[in-house]
Amino acid sequence: MVLRGTNQEQARPYNRRIVLECIRNGGPATRGDIAARVGLTVQTVSTIVRELEDQNYLLSVREAPKGRGLPPTTLRLNPDGGYAVGISITPLGVEAALMNLAGDMLGSAARSHAHASPNAAFALIGELVAEMRALRQDGRILGVGLAMPGPFDVQSMSFVGPTTLDGWAGVPVRARLEEVSKLPAFIAADTVAAALGVRLYGEGAGIGQFYYLHFGVGLGGTMMQDGVPVRGAWGNAGEIGHIPLMPGGRLCPCGNAGCLERYLSLDAFSNRPDGQSQAEWVAEVTPIFHSAIQTIENLFDPQAVVLGGIAPGELITDLVATTAVLPSSISARYDRTTPRVIASTGRQSVMRGAAALAVSGVLSPRQEITSSPDRAQKRDPFSNGLAA
């Protein structure tokens, strides 16, 4: 995503976010570097930097001189300039974590509750948010991000069956989350949140175009294009779990038969035949898994497929080990610099990504200057410490 500032006076909040996002995306930089990247004057950038330093979002660091003259100061994010809470809700329960601006996880907690009702889930979320806030009682909590399984608002598929949140149709999730957390709330599918977490802090950090395959209770995915998730017209792109891969196969709660996640998911793994070992199950589903990889590669042409999720790390590792030899697809290239399939075994990606949703939602640039003049103005976190 190309970040460009504007010299219009009413765009100062937008420019502040542009500068901050430039440093978040590109790492430490000088004022001149930032000005060149975002199209602002060095004077404008210097003014913005002073404000962000005063508000503790940025730190200035000057390296030791290596010759004549003083080296320029380098600007970097202040890790403790703000915090965000990431929440993940699945059919197995609720997890929460606190993250600083540098992406460090400062603490986490979980509550097991199978297929929690909305009332039960939000009661648990309220408890967990209070626990996370207590970790930094005097810290600036920017917001809360919630990751939950999709797809959303799809006839016969949303909030139905063992791999999603049965009975959640019609629930005003954002309003309920803001009510129990007393924080600005941001919502995304668990696959999108996890892909963001992997892109910012995990195995996808150096890869511009990758498909994140989320091995959860169900199976879904998100294509990351230049660091931005491809969401689709209604936010449900990547629901690979409901591709009917096995004609006439097992019935799926979505109403179809032979859907991929009936064979490849934690739900499918949990319902394997009695006595079947993990290794035996992996061997059985390997042809199906490889077909899924081929489908993803031929549809999206990614640099790599990253397999992660809430599945045990050893299960993800065993599946990825089968991809040393894969059937041909458009990804079978001579000039590859990354494996076709990469394992992401850390279970924190969903919560990291959910917290990053809140950080981005509050601090990332938005073109507010083009909004309608009679639109209610949002609070600016850079002027009064409140989240937008």
Image (cartoon, rainbow, N blue to C red):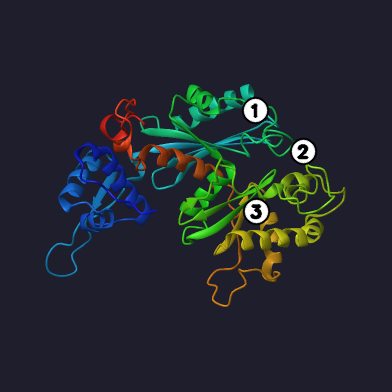
Marks 3 and 2 sit apart, C-alpha to C-alpha, by 27 Å
Q: Which mark is residue 50?
A: none
**Residue located farthest toward the bottom when viewing the structure as drawn:** 334
121 left or right, relative to 131: right
The percent position of residue 385, horizontal first and vertical second, equals 31, 31
Question: Mark 3 or mark 2: which comes first in sequence?
Answer: 2
Q: Give the answer, above or below, for where 330 lies relative to 14.
A: below
50 left or right, relative to 27: left
Circle 1 — which element? loop
The percent position of residue 165, horizontal first and vertical second, equals 67, 33
- Asked whether residue 348 appears in the rendered view, the answer is no
Residue position marked by numbered label 3 in the rendering = 313
Q: Which mark is residue 253?
A: 2
242 or 200, which is in the foreground? 242
Question: Mark 2 or mark 1: which comes first in sequence?
Answer: 1
314 left or right, relative to 303: right
